[in-house]
Image (cartoon, rainbow, N blue to C red):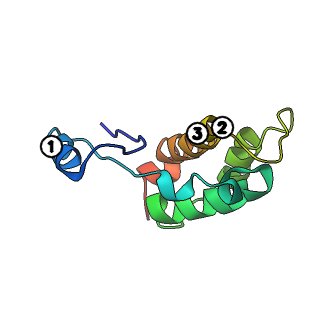
């Protein structure tokens, strides 16, 4: 089980969670307007694909993720905290469920 969530616990609590065979990914560094605005989504996908898939995500998969997350129907200049969180979680979720994550060469 992979538990991708925003870490807000104290370090002792994270370590206790790790003993329950969970993997926690601190999404905080990517929850910035630079990564989560529509123009920053490609950089977010690249950064997380490098971390989670060793940069082995195909350009087609990246484009699908970018198109899904940077939805042009919801344009805004500065994303709210909830929008930033949701976008980073969506990218991380789509990457860990991709075939490139499951099968790394």
- Mark closer to the chain start, 1 or 3: 1
Horizontal side of 46 relative to 96 (left or right) equals right
Q: Position of residue 97 (x, y in %)?
A: 49, 41
Q: Which disc is residue 90 wearing?
A: 3
Horizontal side of 72 relative to 46 (left or right) equals right
Dot 1 falls on a residue whose secondary structure is helix
Label 2, label 1: how far apart the Cα atoms are: 29 Å
Q: Is residue 52 above or below residue 72?
A: below
Q: Nearer the viewer, residue 62 or 44?
A: 44
Answer whether labels 2 and 3 touch (C-beta < 8 Å): no
According to the picture, the residue beneath numbered tag 2 turns out to be: 83
Q: Position of residue 34 (x, y in %)?
A: 70, 60
What residue do we see at 41% from left, 40% from top? Answer: 5
Q: Nearer the viewer, residue 51 or 79?
A: 79
What residue do we see at 51% from left, 40% from top? Answer: 93
Mark 1: few/some/many CA within 10 Å (<14, 14-19, 20+):
few
- Quarter of the rendering occupied by the C terminus: bottom left
Q: Can see residue 59?
A: no
Q: Which disc is residue 51 wearing?
A: none
According to the picture, the residue beneath numbered tag 1 turns out to be: 16
Give the mark toward the camera: 1 or 3.
Answer: 1
Label 2, label 3: how far apart the Cα atoms are: 10 Å
- Mark closer to the chain start, 2 or 1: 1
Q: Nearer the viewer, residue 64 or 72?
A: 72
| Residue, far top | 73
Q: Position of residue 35 (x, y in %)?
A: 66, 57
Answer whether labels 2 and 1 touch (C-beta < 8 Å): no
């Amino acid at each position: 089980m992979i538990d991708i969530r925003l870490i807000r616990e104290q370090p002792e609590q994270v370590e206790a969670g790790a003993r329950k065979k969970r993997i926690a990914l601190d999404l905080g560094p990517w929850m910035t307007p630079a990564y989560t605005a529509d123009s920053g989504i490609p950089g977010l996908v690249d950064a997380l694909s490098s971390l989670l898939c060793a940069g082995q995500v195909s350009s087609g998969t990246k484009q699908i993720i970018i198109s899904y997350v940077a939805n042009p129907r919801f344009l805004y200049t500065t994303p709210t905290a909830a929008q930033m969180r949701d976008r980073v979680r969506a990218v991380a979720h789509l990457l860990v469920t991709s075939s490139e994550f499951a099968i790394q060469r």
